[in-house]
Image (spheres, helix red, strand yellow):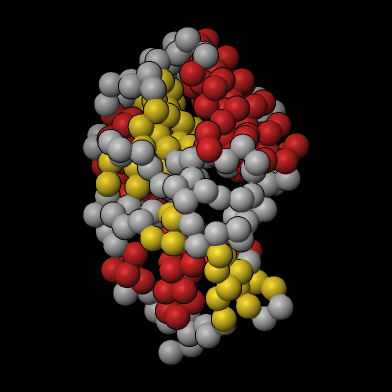
């Protein structure tokens, strides 16, 4: 099968491409750097010629509210139109667990808009919502740095390894369309502050952590279970501490 990955040169796209190619499929890694831009439409239709499946793992270069909404709405509309013209039989998008529970976040609103466009497209589709990646915990810590401390929410999250996001996405890609939403998460739910604390200690960073339920997540307030999956999610095996154990401490 020919499979086109929109955002195919990024973190998840690159991993997914290797997995799909190893299973014997023709993979096209589409990205602006390779002449395919879903937002402008440049190169999109030629890339989808002969494609059986398209997977969208693209991400906005700007997280500003208007910019990210434009990115996902415009790119998704263009992709849907091109997929219909090409006769694509399965459209897959990677989204985020909690998308429909955090509409105070401009980024989550934009992802929800993307999901709804796909749901209403009349294409056979699957949306895979993933929890935060292990590799993103450092960015969560950095977003909360002020006054010499790290301020972070004490609400729950259930992150997973990016390699296992790609693994779950490969299985979804090669499966039958769900025409609905699936979820994937890591094996451990714990407060964001707990994951951030473990990550900081691994970096040799002794910054004080200020945790509380009202500390916002990138400007948006969280409820206890905003970022954890519902029952029925696929749970991947790698634990956060096992992943940390593979990292080299920069100060050691």
* The C terminus: image quadrant: bottom left
Q: Is residue 46 above or below residue 234?
A: above
Q: Is residue 167 visible?
A: yes
Task: Give how far across and how far down residue 178 sits, in percent.
Answer: 33, 22
Q: Using residue 76 as the reference point, say whether residue 228 is left or right of it.
A: left
Q: Using residue 231 as the reference point, say whether residue 132 is left or right of it.
A: right
Task: Give how far across and how far down residue 200 sits, in percent.
Answer: 49, 76
Task: Give how far across and how far down residue 1 sits, in percent.
Answer: 31, 24
Q: Using residue 195 as the reference point, say whether residue 99 is left or right of it.
A: right
Which residue is at 57% across, 41% downward?
102
Task: Give how far across and how far down residue 96 sits, in percent.
Answer: 48, 41
Which residue is at 32% across, 52% downward?
186
Of 7 and 210, the residue lying toward us: 210
Of 154 and 85, the residue lying toward us: 154
Q: Is residue 53 above or below residue 69?
A: above
Q: Residue furthest bottom?
A: 252
Which residue is at 31% across, 57% downward?
188
Which residue is at 28% across, 41% downward?
234
Q: Is residue 151 above or below residue 65?
A: below
Q: How many marks?
A: 0
Q: Is residue 241 above or below residue 215?
A: below
Q: Is residue 19 visible?
A: no
Of 43 and 235, the residue lying toward us: 235
């Amino acid at each position: 099968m020919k499979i086109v990955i929109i955002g195919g040169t990024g973190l998840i796209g690159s991993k997914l491409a290797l997995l799909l190619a190893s299973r014997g499929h023709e993979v096209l890694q589409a990205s602006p750097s390779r002449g395919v831009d879903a937002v402008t439409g440049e190169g999109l239709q030629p890339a989808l010629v002969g494609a059986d499946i398209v997977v969208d793992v693209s991400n906005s270069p700007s997280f500003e509210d208007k910019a990210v909404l434009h990115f996902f709405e415009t790119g998704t509309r263009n992709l849907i139109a091109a997929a219909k013209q090409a006769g694509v039989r399965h459209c897959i998008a990677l989204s985020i667990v909690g998308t429909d529970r955090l509409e105070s976040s401009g980024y989550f609103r934009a992802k929800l808009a993307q999901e709804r466009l796909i749901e209403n497209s009349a294409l056979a589709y699957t949306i895979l919502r993933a929890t935060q990646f292990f590799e993103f915990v450092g960015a969560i810590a950095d977003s909360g740095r002020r006054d010499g401390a790290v301020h972070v929410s004490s609400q729950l999250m259930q992150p997973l390894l990016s390699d296992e996001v790609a693994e779950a996405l490969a299985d979804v890609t090669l499966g039958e369309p769900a025409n609905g939403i699936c979820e994937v998460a890591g094996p451990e739910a714990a407060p964001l502050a707990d994951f951030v604390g473990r990550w900081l200690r691994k970096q040799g960073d002794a910054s004080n952590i200020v945790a509380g339920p009202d500390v916002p997540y990138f400007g948006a307030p969280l409820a206890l279970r905003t970022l954890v999956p519902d029952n029925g999610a696929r749970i991947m095996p790698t634990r956060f501490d096992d992943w940390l154990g593979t990292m080299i401490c920069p100060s050691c």
